[in-house]
Image (tube, grey):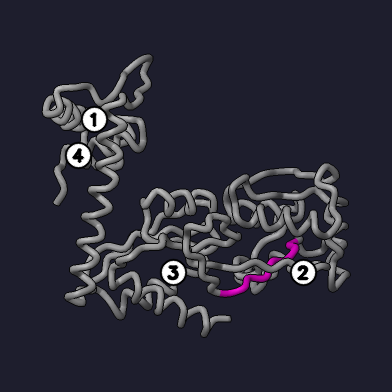
Amino acid sequence: MADRRLQVFHTVARLLSFTKAAEELHMTQPAVTFQVRQLEEQFNTRLFDRTHNRISLTDAGKRVYEYAERIFELYGDMDRSVRDLTGDMSGVLILGASTTIAEYMLPVLLGDFKAKHPEVTIRLKVANTEGIVSQIENNEIDMGVVEAPVNNKNLVVEECRTDQMVLIVPPGHELTKEKTVPIKRIVDYPFICREEGSGTREVMIESMVAGGVNLSDLNVAMELGSLEAIKGAVEAGMGVSILSKATILKELRLGTLVALELDPPITRPFSFVHQKQKFRVRSMDELLNFARSYCQSHK
């Protein structure tokens, strides 16, 4: 509904890149440039400074961006308010989830929700917890499901369920003789870790420190951004790791990995996160209620 030129300008200003804006808007770069130039002609001033293949907002550009933010927020409030009044359940919901949740929790939940509400289109973006929280803060997604604590007090955080994390080792590993492994013993073995920004890594590091582990003694053999890559590396005998028990159920059934409880145990919350909004799309409220029921029945 909003002026297309303003939408294109807002995207370029947010990303500070014509190329990235073109990709996000599914437009060609010349088309994006044309829309911005039209807006500059309307205001009879430059909105961007272009130097050395980098762009920045001019003072006028900053002013237009501030108003664009308010305009799009008002459009969103209006749309949500009318849809809520009319009980409209159609539309698009953009969700974000960290890797563990997207791969091992959401498929069943979203499949059941779509079966009940086929008129709602759901788009899922997968990133680590840090990235998901950032996208919520920037209003790029409607709701996130994350696996680590969220420190932004301006966001609504609602715990869904508690996840247990375990030490994983290959069959035949010397630790398989023990029922529970003191967390301090992890420093005795090559350790395969998630990448920085991962909720799994954040919770794991905090738990290690709380358990008396000196992180400088940790023998990090690899840092991997994929759960499947971590599991494969452990199966190959390249080290040990700590993952959610929910992510290794198939490997436990096949006998390719062994899960060992840690002392002290490591648990973490899976939480819904969204903006504090006066108006929300009815479909988002319905999804939240559906997800709450799902979490209650899958504890």
Which of the two labelled residues, at mark 2 and mark 3, occupies the earlier sequence position? 3
User: Where does the image place residue 207, in percent across and percent down from the top left?
Assistant: 75, 59
Helix, strand or loop at disc 2? loop
Cα–Cα gap, marks 2 and 3: 27 Å
User: Where does the image place residue 289, in percent across and percent down from the top left?
Assistant: 40, 78
Question: Badge 4: how crowded within 10 Å, few (<14), some, or many (20+)?
Answer: many
Cα–Cα gap, marks 3 and 1: 35 Å
Label the magenta part by its dominant secondary structure: strand
Q: Amino acid at mark 4?
A: Leu
Q: Which mark is residue 18?
A: none
Cα–Cα gap, marks 4 and 1: 16 Å
Provide the residue designation for mark 2: 265
Q: Which mark is residue 107?
A: 3
Q: Amino acid at mark 1?
A: Gln
Find out whether residue 249 is within the magenta segment.
no
Which of the 4 quarters of the picture holds residue 27? top left
Point out the stretch of residues depicted in magenta.
161-168
Q: How many marks?
A: 4
Task: Give the residue drawn at x 53%, y 61%.
Answer: 146
Provide the residue designation for mark 4: 6
Q: Nearer the viewer, residue 88 or 254?
A: 88
Q: Amino acid at mark 3?
A: Pro
Q: Are marks 2 and 3 in contact (CB under 8 Å)?
A: no
Cα–Cα gap, marks 4 and 3: 36 Å
Q: Are marks 2 and 1 in contact (CB under 8 Å)?
A: no
Provide the residue designation for mark 1: 29
Helix, strand or loop at disc 3? helix
